[in-house]
Amino acid sequence: MIFNNMNDTEIQPILTSIIKEAGELVKEGFYTTKQISFKSPSDPVTNIDLASETLIRERLGQYFPDIEILGEEYGGNIISDELRWVIDPIDGTRNFAAGIPHFCVSIGLVQGNNPVVGSIYDPIRDELFFSQSNQGATLNGESMQVSTKTNPGDFIIGLDIGRIDDKAIHAFKLIENLFPTMQCLRVFGSAALGMAYAASGRIDIFLHHSLSPWDIAAGLLLVTESNGITLDKATLKQANLLTKGLLCSSEELLNIFLKMTENEKWYQ
């Protein structure tokens, strides 16, 4: 199936209904005693992650039965040329499990490796970020755009590191070498919200080096539809669904940032 052949005018209200229903489930679960297990030592999953993905899969299957689904918890085809949904039932599970109210639900529709619809919902703040190819991006219905700052001394940098390893050390070294020429650093614990915050101009640049497709499927489009760009940190070309590490902001800001950090090991 090709995205252009779908009735795309129906996608936004349907997707909004689904992601908000999942968000309500997640919000209610946040205030309960959670069942927590670990897929790996640094990768927790809760019973609410599983319930959220199950709900999203059921709803998407009802409305779009011919579109396959890739999800963090129940899998699917990572490599495909087909139109498919890519879902993260809770992005920021470590925050969620620890009682830190900074997490979201993320749903992207991708054709091959490129997103065509993206939605991120923060149920704690009731904030819905939405984008569709060539139609711009919105936050709760209001148009948004990336930061227009150009003075490094004004930059607020968002960073997530995944697990603590050599890549994380390189990320912190990059930040250390930037001080005091930047304003401040924020470490969020949710890649999807980090990208949404960059898309809305709340932060000026977002960096991450340990990503999976469900982390970025919605955020990639949010940034580009907010007049920004996303770069694969390894190639410095446009990021896509298979990108493992990225930078996102305005083109002008990223050009400044790349010149300031061109010799950093984080890019390797």
Image (tube, rainbow, N blue to C red):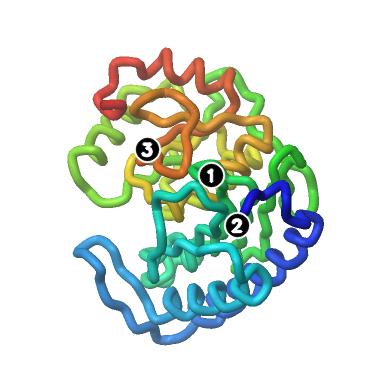
Res 29 seen here: yes
| Residue 159 vs residue 230, the one in the foreground | 230
Q: Say what amino acid the circle numbered 1 marks.
A: Met
Q: Identify residue for label 3.
A: 245
Quarter holding the N terminus?
A: bottom right
Instruction: First in sequence, mark 2 or 3: give its number.
Output: 2
Mark 2 lies on a secondary structure that is strand
Task: Classify residue 169 as left or right of residue 46.
Answer: left
Residue 208, above or below 17: above
Residue 169, above or below 68: above
Q: Identify residue for label 2.
A: 120
Quarter holding the C terminus?
A: top left
- Label 2 and label 3: CA atoms lie apart by 19 Å
- Label 3 and label 1: CA atoms lie apart by 12 Å
Residue at the image point whose x is 67% and y is 49% from the top: 3
Residue at the image point whose x is 25% and y is 32% from the top: 170
Q: Are marks 1 and 2 in contact (CB under 8 Å)?
A: yes
- Label 1 and label 2: CA atoms lie apart by 10 Å
Instruction: First in sequence, mark 1 or 2: give its number.
Output: 2
